Amino acid sequence: MATNRCRTTLKRLDCGNIVETQAKNTYEPFSVCLPFGRRLVWDGQGLRLQGRITTTDGKYGLFTVENGCITSAEEQPACEYTAQPCTPAATPCGGDGTSSISLQPGPDNILNFDASGRLGGQIKYSTNTEGLTISGYGTTSSPLVIDYTPSAAAKTYVQGTTSAVTVTGDGTATSPYAIAHIESALGAGTYGGFTIDSFGHVTGYEEQDLGLTKVQAGIGINATQNGTIATVSLPAQSDTYGTRQLGGFNVSVDGQGIVTGFTQVIGFPLDDEATSFTLNPEYNDLEFNAFGSLVAYNPKTPVAKDHFIEVFDPGRTSTSFTFTTTKSAHFKITYRGRLPANSPGSNIFGYYALPAPYSVTINNKRISAQALYSSAHSGIIEVVVVSDAMYSAGAYTVVLSSSQDDFTFTDGATLEVELVARGD
């Protein structure tokens, strides 16, 4: 058995007690990289593992090496190859062609070479048929679109031969032709021995034994007899069939002039005991139909018909407005606004004749006017006209203007017309 000769106890010496320890080996600090982001580090005291694995389990074809250590792994990307532009065609396999592909010469082959020798396909088509149009290339992004619009000669036309047959529609999928038979005014039923439907068609007959010898027609009645069958009818009246409006009612009349029904179409609210009422057209707008019957009325918005006024902005070249009167009267015209003018004197007060270049007209006829001066404003602040003549009801245009070239009203103003009466 081998003997352990290493001393592990204190050794007593003459110079005193000395602890004898075994010498330790010393290593320099170092760091070694491990795959996928980890490191093994010795700092002189101990060995540590740093970092953690971030790469998941799997198969990888692309690795990254940094400072001699694998730091990451990725999937190998697919190889791609992009040919250079205008890559020349491959050398012909044989024959005297200019490419390695020979086109099948049949009429059903849509492939061909362009001027650069590239292979492609194109659909050829003809549109010689009238009304036929074809567009597109037959691809996903540009599909073929075939449209056909028949010419007038190729269309189908349907027309009723009598007034008893009606044709509607234009023969299209959304509006097909509809052929109908108008219903008979007589209506479905049994008349004598005949049974007819709503269109006047005879659907049955039963022999009659009337034992009549003669039928005498009266006033306004037609009577015919064929053997034992007598027919009595009203004569047809010209221009009577249809609906006529009589006053406030629509009256329906058949072809024999008989009233078959009526409907009230015009009515106004009345009190329980009232049978009529009065409307003043001055205060109501009245509406009449083509037959002269009153069908509606609407109250008018009250307006002042004796007083007219208009407001004007500065920068205008003339001041005018048009109004309409409903009665005869004198006109009082008042303009309120500043007009440049020299004063006729010092310390003036009151109205003076309107000086040139200003004038007032009614329907293009000049009329005398008075002007009110203001020393504070260095000019005219008001113009007043009271007509000597009486004007009848009608439309009139009042104008205040200046004969000065390029004259402009620099201030805003009002122009007012009142219908007044003058003393004797």
Image (cartoon, rainbow, N blue to C red):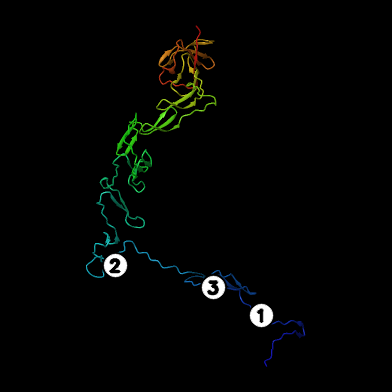
Q: Depth check: 42 or 348 in front?
A: 348
- Residue 408: image location, x then y, percent: 44, 21
Identify the mark at residue 24; answer none if there is no mark: 1
User: Which label lies toward us, 1 or 2?
Assistant: 2
Q: Position of residue 413 (x, y in %)?
A: 50, 21
145 w.r.t. 19: above or below? above
Q: Earlier in the sequence, mark 2 or mark 3?
A: 3
Instruction: Tell me where residue 21 sits by quadrant.
Output: bottom right
The amino acid at mark 2 is Ala
The residue beneath circle 3 is: 35
Name which residue lies at 49% across and 28% down.
268
Closer mark to the observer between disc 2 and disc 3: 2
Residues 390 and 186: in front is 186
Viewer-nearest residue: 300 or 288: 288
Amino acid type indicated by mark 1: Lys
| Disc 3 from disc 1: Cα separation | 32 Å
Name which residue lies at 25% across and 51% down.
129
- 359 displayed left or right of 87: right
Q: CA distance from mark 2 to mark 3?
A: 48 Å
Give residue 162's mark.
Answer: none
